[in-house]
Image (cartoon, rainbow, N blue to C red):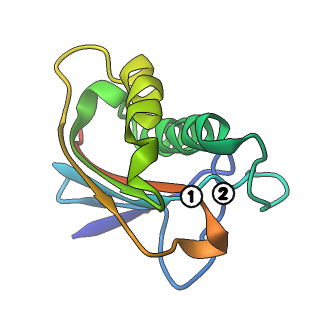
Amino acid sequence: MKKIISTDQAPAAIGPYSQAIKTNGSLLFVSGQIPLNPKTGNIVEGGIVAQTTRVLDSLKAILSAADCTLDSVIKTTVYLKDISDFATVNEVYAKYFTQNCPARVCIEVANLPKDALVEIDVIAAAAE
């Protein structure tokens, strides 16, 4: 059994996918978020700090729509267009995940949708 989760507080899906899927009331899979302004659909300006902040705010909004918080996150995957941005992304990330941090993977990729600098997806433990 699956339940589609969506919110207008995060960017709408730009393809044939859902913002998130809640399964059997126990796991929440949140699609990768790129730094889109939820109102305009455009990439936010301001470089890697602004883009990472927007991505994490979008993830937080989607989690909230599923009655979850950042504390519910058990795993993240961070995709970076340039791995040299890792330390900066890590500083922003640490402001959102402050204790009992989730498991994480971080990889450099050749390109991201809309030429974004960062994309992050999460898996969370969802309340029933």
State whether residue 128 appears in this view.
no
x and y percentages locating residue 104 in the rendered image: 20, 44
Checking the image for residue 5, the label placed there is: none
The residue tagged with tag 2: helix, strand or loop? Answer: loop
Give the CA separation, mark 1 to mark 2: 9 Å
Q: Quadrant of residue 24?
A: bottom left
Please tell me whether mark 1 or mark 2 is closer to you in this view: 1
Q: Name the quadrant of the N terminus.
A: bottom left
Residue lying at the far front of the rendered structure: 84
Q: Which of the two labelled residues, at mark 1 and mark 2, occupies the earlier sequence position?
A: 2
Residue picked out by circle 1: 34
State whether residue 98 appears in this view.
yes
* Local crowd size for mark 2, using a 10 Å CA cut-off: few (<14), some (14–19), many (≥20): many
Residue picked out by circle 2: 11
Residue lying at the far right of the rendered structure: 40
Residue at image coords 64%, 69%: 115
**Amino acid identity at mark 1:** Ile
Does 44 sit above or below residue 2? above
x and y percentages locating residue 23 in the rendered image: 22, 61
* Local crowd size for mark 1, using a 10 Å CA cut-off: few (<14), some (14–19), many (≥20): many
Does 125 sit above or below residue 79? above
Residue at image coords 33%, 23%: 97
Q: Nearer the viewer, residue 1 or 39?
A: 39
